[in-house]
Structures are given as C-alpha cells and as structure tokens.
Amino acid sequence: MNVICVEHLTRDYGGGKGVFDATFQVSQGEVFGFLGPNGAGKTTTIRHLMGFLRPQAGACTIAGLDCWKDRARIQAQLGYVPGEISFFDDMTGVEYLKFLERYRNLRGSNRKGELLDYFQLEPKGKIKKMSKGMKQKLGLVAALMHDPEMAKLLDSYVELMPEIMAAVGMTAGATSLMGFLCSYLYGFLLLIFPMLFCILRGNGLVAKYVDDSSMVSLMSAPVRRSTIALTQGAVMVSGTLILTVYITALEWFSGEYYFPGQLDLGELLQVNAGLFCLHLCLGGICFFASCLFSETKYSLGVGAGLSILMYVFQMMANMGGKAENAKYFTVFTLFQPEKLAAGESDAVAGALVLLALGIILYGAAVAVFTRKDLHI
C-alpha cells in the first residue's frame, strides 16, 4: 500500500529551478531516502506534501488525501521536521513539548517520555541555550510523539454515523490512548453500565425489602432506622467505589498489555475520580428514591426514570443546535473526562459539585427513611 504518492509534480521558479515532472511512491512501513544536490527541489517537494505550496501541475497525496485540498487533515496527523527549526526560544524544552501536547490534543500520551529516553534528551533547560544537536532532537520528539493511527478505525465509524456517535459522546480525532478512552468509552459504556448498577442496586437495598416485607426482620432487631439506612447506603457507596476501582484496573492493565507506556496513570485516576463522583450522584438519586418509596415500581420509576431522562438530555445536548440547551438539565454535563485528564479547573469543580450532590442525596435518603411511615 502506497502512503505517499507524487505524480508528475511540477513547480517552475524560472531559471531551471524548481521541481519538474517528479513522480515517486512511498509504501507503508518503508524508509525512503530523498536525496539530491542543492537546488534539486527536495524542500519544494516536501513543502507540497505538507500543503504549504499548491502544485502548478501534477498532484501529490498522503494516505489518499490530496496534499493541497486536504492539508488541514494531513497536517493534523503528520510529523514534520524542517531543516531549520524555529522554536520559542524563551521556553524550556519541557514547556515547548507541553505546549504542543495541548495544541495537538495529545492528552495522556507517554510516547514523549519514550522518545526522550531514546534520544537521551533532558529538555528542562531554555531552548535558546541548547546546542544545535539538542534542538534537532527536540524537534524529532515534537514530530514523533503523537500516534494518529490509534483511533483510525473507530473514527471511520464516527464519519459514517456522525449524529448517532455524537449523541452517545463519541468524537473522532483522538491522538493518544487517554484521548481514545475519553472519546469512545466515557461518553457511553462507562456511563451506562455503572448507571444500571446504581439503578438496580439502589432499588434493591431498601425499597425491595420494604415491598416484599423482608424489612420486618431488620426492624424487629434492636437497631435504629438511621443505622439501617446508613448501612445500606454504605453498601451502595462501597459497591460504586469497587466498580470504579475495577474499571480503573481493567483500563490500566489492558493499556499496559496492548499499548505499553502509552496510558498516563495519573490522568486515568483523575478521570475515574470524576467518574466515581458522577455515579455517586446517580447512586444518590436511586438510593433516595428507594428510601422515599415503599414499592419497587415507584422506586425504580423515579430512580431509573430520572437517571435515564438526564442521559437522554445529555445525548440531545451532544447533538448540538437548539437541543444543546438540554445540558442545563442533566448532571452528566458536569462530568468532562477530557478536561479532567488535562487537570482543568472547571472540570475539577464539576466533579466536586457531583460529589457534593451525592453526599447531600445520601444524607437526605437516610433522613427520609428514618422519618417515613413503614407499612410492613
């Protein structure tokens, strides 16, 4: 499979200078040396491939994309090191690489660390004080630290079904393993399945026992109602915590097995701490409904109904347009995995709000159960 195709490329600067009827192909996985004397047109050809210049005649493509018409898409995926590299000299090497990570949305990528080790480069110093060799190494790390192929398959599904994928929080363009997880797992799977756990477990801890009269045996013991409610609430919270720890461990070990060194544990913990806060809040809603109602049909109706309705609102908001205002009616909006991975303050604040709502709901559930009339 040819990744780079140059067909009869021509650009005439006059005086015999430029590129004239150049044709060549580069296959996937091939190392291709592009050699020639000064003025032969090597840099001009590469500038055409990068989409910096428009061909006067002929064409060039990368991965089937036209290098001029699709230059934005190509530049988002390509690593490029020019002969003369321009840096922000007042930055340190670390600051420069972090700037590029933010610019190219490379959250969670550890490939940078691998490349720094490979090139034996310590980038803490100011760039303007680096030697030419160190600057070249820094340029190579900057060009190679992304991995555009990681989410290519799922991105194709997003392009085929953009509205459906957007509705369930799946977005294309992830360039790191953490970005991939945020794009494809935290918008749907890791919301739906823990939410189902909260709905079923929350109903089963109180309302189910009251409805089938099993609560009689608990109430006949010399135990206060508040103690019963607190114990059942603790079971719910611990179950949510165990589920979150299991998800975290599964993601971490799977990432290390299939993509060693590419998943940032700190960022994963930050995101899953926010995930725990979200499901603590949803669990609080379901547990409150379970303590409020004595029949499972009402407990499930309110607990499951509110949770599912808020997820539907989130789906509507994800689709954009006028429906975007639906985000103000759902707690799912407060969970922002990509921003949590980056440590952004507004995402952290959203997670803390979810945590506070969860604590309030569990406290209210205990209070309601302690004071309600039980017909058992």
Image (cartoon, helix red, strand yellow):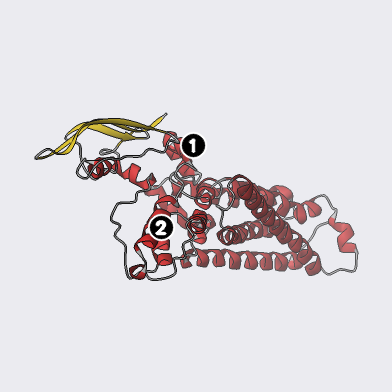
Number of marks: 2
- Identify the image quadrant of residue 230: bottom right
Which amino acid type is shown beneath numbered disc 1?
Answer: Leu
Q: Position of residue 121 (x, y in %)?
A: 46, 62
Q: Is residue 298 visible?
A: no
Q: What residue sits right under mark 1 in the picture?
A: 153
Tag nearer the camera, 1 or 2: 2
Given residues 132 and 95, the one toward you in this image is 132
Q: SS of the residue at dot 1?
A: helix
Q: SS of the residue at dot 2?
A: helix
Given residues 160 and 71, the one toward you in this image is 71
Which amino acid type is shown beneath numbered disc 2?
Answer: Lys
- Marking on residue 125: none
Q: Residue furthest left?
A: 15
Residue 32 vertical placement versus 279 (above, below)? above
Q: What residue sits right under mark 2 in the picture?
A: 137
Q: Position of residue 85 (x, y in %)?
A: 30, 57
**Callout 1 crowding tier (Cα within 10 Å): few <14, some 14–19, many ≥20:** few
Q: Position of residue 285 (x, y in %)?
A: 64, 58
Residue at 90%, 65% (x, y): give it: 221
Given residues 326 and 66, the one toward you in this image is 66
Contact between labelled residues 2 and 1, with CB atoms less than 8 Å apart: no
